[in-house]
Every structure is written in C-alpha cells, then in structure tokens.
Amino acid sequence: MTYPNPGTEVTTPSRADRVKAAGGVMIAWVALLWLLEVVDTATGGALDTYGLSPRSFGELRDVIPMAFLHHGFEHLASNTVPLLVLGFLAALGGIRRFAAVVLTIMVVGGLGVWLTAADHSNTVGASGVVFGLLGYLLVRGFVNRSAVDLVVGLVVLAVYGSVLWGVLPTDPSISWQGHLFGLVGGVLAAFLYRTKRPVRAGAAVPLIP
C-alpha cells in the first residue's frame, strides 16, 4: 500500500490565484494577437505567408501560426471578446490543462483546414480556437460530471450558441472548415483532459506487490 511522503506538502492554487493566472494568460494572448496584426499591417502583410494553404506538406508548419494571425483589424476585433471570455473560463481549470486543450484545438482545427479548405486559399484567424473553446466548455461538464461546469456550459450556450451556425458553409469568405474542426478539437480535448475524480474514503486502494 502506498502512502504520501510525510515530508511533502501538496498545495492547491486558491480561487483568486486561478482567476489571476487565467486573466493574465488571456490578456497576454490577446495583446500578442494585436501586436502581430500591427506588425503585419506595418509590413504590408508580410506575416500572411504563415497562413495555412491546403494539401501542401510544406504548409503543415503553419498549422499553429495560422491561429495567431488575422486578415485585418476588423477580423481580429471580431475574435477578441469571445476569445477573452471563453479562454478565461477554460483557463480557470488550470493553466497546464488549458495549454493542452488549446494545442489540441489548434492541431485538430489546423489539420482539418489543411485537408478540406478550398484550393489556393490562405486561412488565418483565432476563430477556430474560439469554436474549439466553445465546444470544450459545452461538453466539459458532462465529461467531468461537474455541476459547476454544467452551469458554465449552459451559460456559454445561451450567450454564444448562435455562433454554432458558423460551422456551415454559408459564406465562401469564411473558413467554416476552421470553425467545424476547431469545434471537434475542443470536444475531443474535453475527453482527453477530463478531470480525474478523487478516490472516495473507504474505497479500495491498489496494493503494490
């Protein structure tokens, strides 16, 4: 039977610490996106080369960078508030888990775009991450069997649920592929990084031979 080391102290971040960490991460992330757009505009779109074009193996290196770039300030502004809100809510669950969730969304969303986007297109934007975070928050409560997360998911659905129509190919100028596969990546991340439930008192404890 295993026992904790008496000389080891385990600390859990307080709610205030989680709020500060989540807020700090999201403010820094959004600030980076705006800085990159300033640089891109000042250089005449020099960063657009890091957008993702489909079905070219050399473009696979842009699966992650594409999520940090935008086609103009209007495009970036439309993603800023939902990214801040949804990212903050997701990051409250822990920064390391949040980083893993976002990376999963970016990879799944980016690969989906790479496989299915229209020929000769160049896809950039954080909207795939926004849809991924939306999907993650919507199903996280069910996966974790958490009443708090369920309530958060319902509130998110009430506020942002209408954007789910963005997964449909209704506008050729909008990457519905990024939205759809970002959403898929978020749902997948909810299952991959589910919260481990603590062992209840009196439950069987595995023996080490």
Image: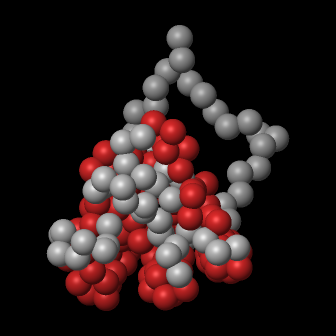
| Picture residue at 55% right of the left edge, 85% below the top | 73
Residue at the far top: name it. 209
Q: Taking 12 as reference, is 79 above or below it?
A: below
Point out residue 94 in the picture as x, y percentages from the top left corner. 58, 62
204 with respect to 165 (left or right):
right
Nearer to me, 131 or 172: 172
Residue 58 seen in the current view: yes
Q: Taking 45 as reference, is 163 above or below it?
A: below
53 with respect to 40 (left or right):
left
Point out residue 58 in the picture as x, y percentages from the top left corner. 51, 39
Q: Taking 123 as reference, is 103 above or below it?
A: above
Check the picture and name the quadrant holding the N terminus.
top right
| Picture residue at 45% right of the left edge, 86% below the top | 78
Point out residue 25 in the picture as x, y percentages from the top left corner. 66, 71
Res 123 → quadrant: bottom left
How many marks the image carries: the answer is 0
Res 2 → quadrant: top right
| Picture residue at 42% right of the left edge, 40% below the top | 56
| Picture residue at 28% right of the left edge, 56% below the top | 118
Q: Taking 64 as reference, is 13 above or below it?
A: below
Point out residue 152 in the picture as x, y percentages from the top left corner. 36, 78
Residue at the far right: name it. 7
26 with respect to 144 (left or right):
right
Q: How is the image coloured?
A: secondary structure
Res 127 → quadrant: bottom left
Nearer to me, 164 or 177: 177
Residue 103 seen in the current view: no
